[in-house]
Amino acid sequence: MPAVVADTPVVHSLVAQVMGDLGTPTLLLDRGGDPHSFQLRPSQAQAIASADAVIWVGPELAPWMGRAIEGTGTSGRVLTLLDVEGVTLRAFADGHAHDHDDDHDDDHDHDHDHEDDHAHDHDDHAEAHGHDDDHDDHADAHDHDHDDHAHDDHGHDHDDHGHDHAHDGTDPHAWLDPRNASVWLGAIAADLSALDPDNATIYAANADAAQAALVALEDEVRATLAPVGDAPIVVFHDAYGYFAHRFGVNVAGTIALGDAAAPGAARLTEMRAMLSDGGIACVFPEVNHTSRHVDTVIEGTDTRVGAMLDPAGVEMEYGPELYSTLMRTLATQIADCVTEG
């Protein structure tokens, strides 16, 4: 069986669903680790170097992984999921309200067949993606220059530096739209089939089953969030644009303006003023980020504080069920807080 390495819990979950009983992928990110900033151990670097396939989100999320792929000189296939044909990418909202009501209702009229748009022809996927030959070209096309990327400039100490800079470019949290996850499942099946053609039909069948489950999951999440309506919420950082857009959640603002930046005094003052005006239903802290910033912005207001969100699933039980657990949990946590009042 191919030796497959995945960078984050979400990617590991999707790969595990496609591999099924044929094998288990190796997950690099330790439990509770920060997908934006992670230090590989020598054994993990060796796993990348010796892998038959390395599957990762992309340098926008994990610049450390990009450096590791280049530094280890892996000869395996590299599948960069943000580069996959058919993925819908969004820009960061830079702390402003997401266009949550643009088209999520129209999009929902998918008649449970949107996976057909995700290119179930796994062999064609393998050719279209060109993972071995044009990975660098894809990177250029998507502005994936490792040196220029904002993550490297931000630094990764969430609490001590990197305050208050705008965060622009591609939002890498694309898995929070289940239709992107569905596209990724097909791409993963194509990549594994190219490595292990004897089991191509199994990978394809596993991906098809997982894609069908995502259709039901999308409906379930939408139903869970229905009572939330247009109630405005504030989250810690700008990681929820895909989720907000797909499900119509009104993210009115973010406490921090980037993935790797702690909010400075000016940003905290701005957010505190927003909350003081009233109308924000809930504020949500987040794993890997201190809650003291949330305490600061809600001080003197009656804004409810919701559960600590985990948009990358870093505190969840790893495995094939993690993705669906993550999506259900996000929906439930948001709905529970908003409907509490």
Image (spheres, rainbow, N blue to C red):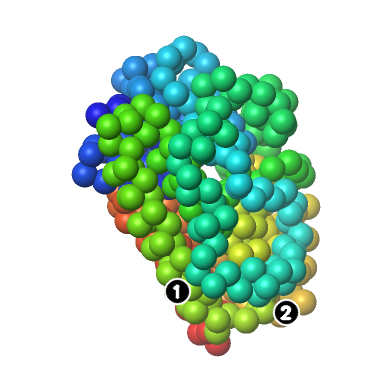
Question: Alpha-carbon neighbours of circle 2 within 10 Å: few (<14), some, or many (≥20)?
Answer: few
- The local secondary structure at tag 1 comes to helix
Q: Residue at x 52, y 16 (%)?
A: 70
- When asked about the image quadrant of residue 54, the answer is top left
How many marks do you count on the picture? 2
Residue 159: percent from the left, percent from the top?
58, 43
Residue nearer the viewer, 213 or 175: 213
Amino acid type at mark 2: Gly
| Horizontal arrangement in the rendering, residue 208 relative to residue 305 (left or right) | left
Q: Residue at x 60, y 36 (%)?
A: 83
Mark 2 or 1, closer to the camera = 1
Question: Alpha-carbon neighbours of circle 1 within 10 Å: few (<14), some, or many (≥20)?
Answer: some
Q: Which residue is mark 1?
A: 220
Residue nearer the viewer, 89 or 107: 107
Q: Which residue is mark 2?
A: 278
Does 111 sit above or below residue 63? below
Residue 39 seen in the figure: no
- Which numbered disc flags the more N-terminal residue, 2 or 1? 1
Does 128 sit above or below residue 115? above
Residue nearer the viewer, 182 or 293: 182
Residue 39: percent from the left, percent from the top?
45, 27
Specify the quadrant that holds the C terminus. Answer: bottom right
